[in-house]
Amino acid sequence: MKPPFEDLGFAKIDHDRQRRKGFPEVIYCEGKTPAQIAKIAQKIKNNGHDVLATRADKKAYLTVKKVLKKATYHKEARIITFKRPLAARRSSLAAKIAIVSAGTADIPVAEEAAVTAEFLGNKVERFFDVGVAGIHRLCANLDKIRKAKVIIVVAGMEGALASVVGGLVDKPVIAVPTSIGYGASFKGLSALLTMMNSCAPGVAVVNIDNGFGAACMAQAIIRS
């Protein structure tokens, strides 16, 4: 029987993940060489799967582009994607996910969540720079945000936006603390602890700067 993974020596690619999770193995690029990333991407594609590579720089993208000519680089999200022809893809659930960021500086993490969610087949609507320092900006978009199936809230500093949104909506909220903030924010720890101590019901929290993880959790909620 063929094993459900492919051993490249430096990596063991989990080709069975599509069946188990609904999406293929994702490449985390930090710590890998561009050549390793390209080799893994090529193998994932050759096994009939789409390719998503996170925390990728331009050098990694240019190397992947040599083996996957139609790969796309999402600079702000630091993500490489490759999608097979439409006819070869599985049908999408096409649920709506709202990505809400507190400040402009949080956008890279918010975009990581947005691009990942779109890659997984969802409709994404972005609401950026609507933090608690100007709460009227959030209120002006609240009706649209409430229409989403799942809401991802991305915030640094004190991370209060997740609790505010969680108290105003009836949908699951996934909170993403970011490392944005002055010294006492402790590179995202302050936002993380605020979000974990939220009194608003229905708020779950992922790790600091983990936009990818938030999108995957949103997908799991939608598929359940």
Image (cartoon, grey):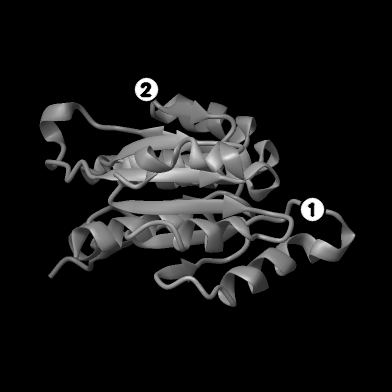
Q: Callout 1: 10 Å neighbours few (<14), some, many (20+)? A: some
Work out whether residue 13 can be spotted. no
Quarter holding the N terminus?
Answer: bottom left
Work out whether residue 132 can be spotted. yes
Residue marked by disc 2: 70
Q: Nearer the viewer, mark 1 or mark 2?
A: 1
Labels 1 and 2: the sequence-earlier one:
2
Residue 197 vs 60, above or below: the answer is below
**Viewer-closest of 75 and 177:** 177
Quarter holding the C terminus?
Answer: bottom left
Which amino acid lies under the numbered mark 1 shown in the image of this protein? Gly
Residue at 53% across, 42% down: 138
- Residue 177: give x, y in percent of width and height: 62, 60
Which amino acid lies under the numbered mark 2 shown in the image of this protein? Lys
Which mark is on residue 9? none
- Residue 153: give x, y in percent of width and height: 51, 53
- Residue 212: give x, y in percent of width and height: 47, 53
In-image side of 13 versus 200 (left or right): left
